[in-house]
Amino acid sequence: MNGRVADAVKGHWVDTHAPEWLRPYARLARWERPIGWWLLLWPCWWSAGLAAIAKGSAFPDPVHLALFLIGAIAMRGAGCTYNDLVDQDIDAKVARTRSRPIPSGQVTPLQAKVFLVLQALVGLAVLLSFNRFTIVLGIASLLPVAIYPFMKRVTNWPQLFLGFAFSWGALMGWAAAFGSLGWTPILLYLGGILWTIGYDTIYAHQDKEDDALVGVKSTARLFGERTKPALVLLYAGATALFAAAAAMADAGPAAFAGIAAGAIHLLWQIARLDINDPDQCLKLFRSNTRYGWIVFAGFLVEAMISA
């Protein structure tokens, strides 16, 4: 066995340059797949961008942006490690996941638990750099993170619970800037949940046959051939909520232009989607990194103009 994971990026630095002893842990944390931490990071940075607009600053606090980046990488890795520990029996039965480090024996469950703690400590160090309100808010995020891996066993909507966890940064960016919450971050959070359900539904279509065999539930299986209409509703709702959040922050035209351009990208995803083509589903899922940049760029330009 070469240790590589079936659904990982091929020829990545983890497989070619990382020390041998580090590779199983890097695969466990999905370091070769940055899309995960980008999706965790974007709500943080969007929230920080809207906070800058509301405060009249020309740019979001760069220290906050850097801390959110480090925290997203660490906590996404910790989340993947935790998820793989919970799902090791299921992963062993699914073709795409049975080569992951735990089911394939590259990492023992005990080693994975130690690695989980180390990553969580990095995340804690980042969290303690913020104000007290943000620290408490960050600790509260552990609840949706903890329950998410179990939801695929009990509900057709595990993507909803992923949205609760992955969109939490929409609250954190604003709280870091103001030490409180308001309608702007709440609306951004709700929009992030709908966006997450949408992109993870696309992702889940890769596994729907195996999921049906092992009894794993998902919105991909729930929506089936109605996935495209469902995505229209989800992405339209997300766009409307993002626009409402920008309006609550007194944002100007540049912010709304970014949201509109992002909506065009989301429509492109829906138009291109073939739910029976796993490779295309993965490519469209990964394209949400570009969507994040489009929306964030609009917020940055608006902050500079407003200031």
Image (cartoon, grey):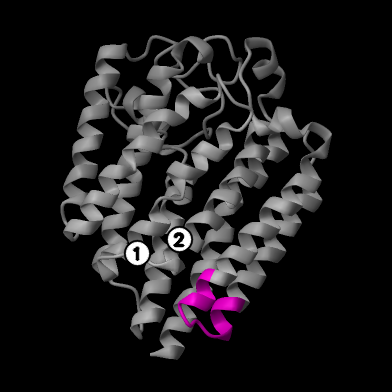
In the figure, is residue 242 to the left or right of 116? right
Q: Residue at x 43, y 73 (%)?
A: 50
* Rendering coords of residue 181 (x, y %): 34, 64
What segment carries the magenta color? 245-256
Q: Which residue is mark 1?
A: 181
Q: Which residue is mark 2?
A: 186
Do the residues under discs 1 and 2 have CB atoms within 8 angstroms? yes
Distance from label 1 to label 2 (Cα)? 8 Å
Q: Which dot marks residue 293?
A: none
Type of amino acid at the residue the image marks with label 1: Leu
* Rendering coords of residue 238 (x, y %): 62, 58
Q: Residue at x 44, y 11 (%)?
A: 103
Dominant secondary structure (helix, strand or loop) of the stretch shown in magenta: helix
Q: Quadrant of residue 140?
A: top left
In the figure, is residue 18 to the left or right of 208? left
Q: Quadrant of residue 180?
A: bottom left
Type of amino acid at the residue the image marks with label 2: Ile
Where disc 1 sits, the SS reads: loop
* Rendering coords of residue 205 (x, y %): 69, 31
